Amino acid sequence: DIQMTQSPSSLSASVGDRVTITCRASQNIRTYLNWYQQKPGKAPKLLIYGASSLQSGVASRFSGSGSGTDFTLTISSLQPEDLATYYCQQSHSSPLTFGQGTTVEIK
Amino acid sequence: EVQLVQSGAEVKKPGESLRISCKGSGYTFTNYWITWVRQMPGKGLEWVGRIDPHDSYTNYSPSFRGHVTISTDNSIATAYLQWSSVKASDTAMYFCATCGGDCYSDYWGQGTLVTVSS
């Protein structure tokens, strides 16, 4: 199985801050990397697919980059509604696997 | 509008059988895989498996293979996740989601809470 490792596990930042979350795959997954946002009590929401493609309707302050084994999700200007847990997921090969999640808190 | 609507919360005793459902609407059901994801209380997302409704081909995570079965009834655009014998450790929220060509999940059900307790 491909292991996905996210860092940090949690972070606290102020409104307007630039926030970066990293995700590392245990083997080359090219750009088969997706990012999801999950707010408390809700289903996950797709933010980024194919490592860098913004899902329709998602705010442009979210962006993704990377290929191979190292990936990044960036929130360019943190907003109060971005309070959530963020997960990366590889869809290169079965079983599809998620990172352990990064919880973003607002200072 | 694409929607996945899941069945309601379940409370079961260990050893009982269980089937939860996920009904798709607003799209051609057989055109997209359905994937199931588990979230245990206070924990992260775990991929259970997926099914191609077109031919019923399934993939399971090794962690779940042999313990759950994924199926569909295309006549009613519904996918199922079932257990023949649930355990307390199956207590979790279960989400269904669509899974397109590169299997990113752009549409999700609202989740079904399964509680297994004696």
Image: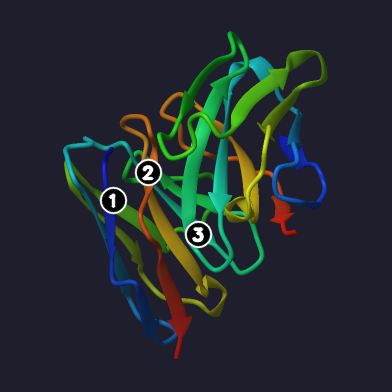
**Residue B92 in picture, x, y percent from top left:** 63, 55
Image quadrant in which the N terminus of chain A is located: top left
Q: Earlier in the sequence, mark 3 or mark 1?
A: 1
* Left or right, residue B95 beside residue A97: right
The one of A51 and B44 positioned closer to us in this rendering: B44
Q: Label 3: state its secondary structure.
A: strand
Label 1 sits on residue: A4
Q: Going 74% across and 38% down the picture, which residue do you hit?
A: B3
The amino acid pointed to by label 3 is Gln
Rendered-image quadrant of the C terminus of chain A = bottom left
Within 10 Å of disc 3 (Cα), the crowding (few <14, some 14-19, many 20+) is many
Q: CA distance from mark 3 to mark 1?
A: 16 Å
**Residues at marks 3 and 1, common chain?**
yes
Question: What label sits on residue A37 in the rendered view?
Answer: 3
Residue B35's x, y, as percent?
56, 33
Residues under labels 1 and 2: Cα distance? 7 Å
Q: Which mark is drawn over residue A97?
A: 2
Q: What's the distance in space between the residues labelled 2 and 3, CA to CA?
A: 15 Å
Q: Residue furthest bottom?
A: A107
Task: Say whether disc 2 or disc 3 marks the residue closer to the N-terminus.
Answer: 3
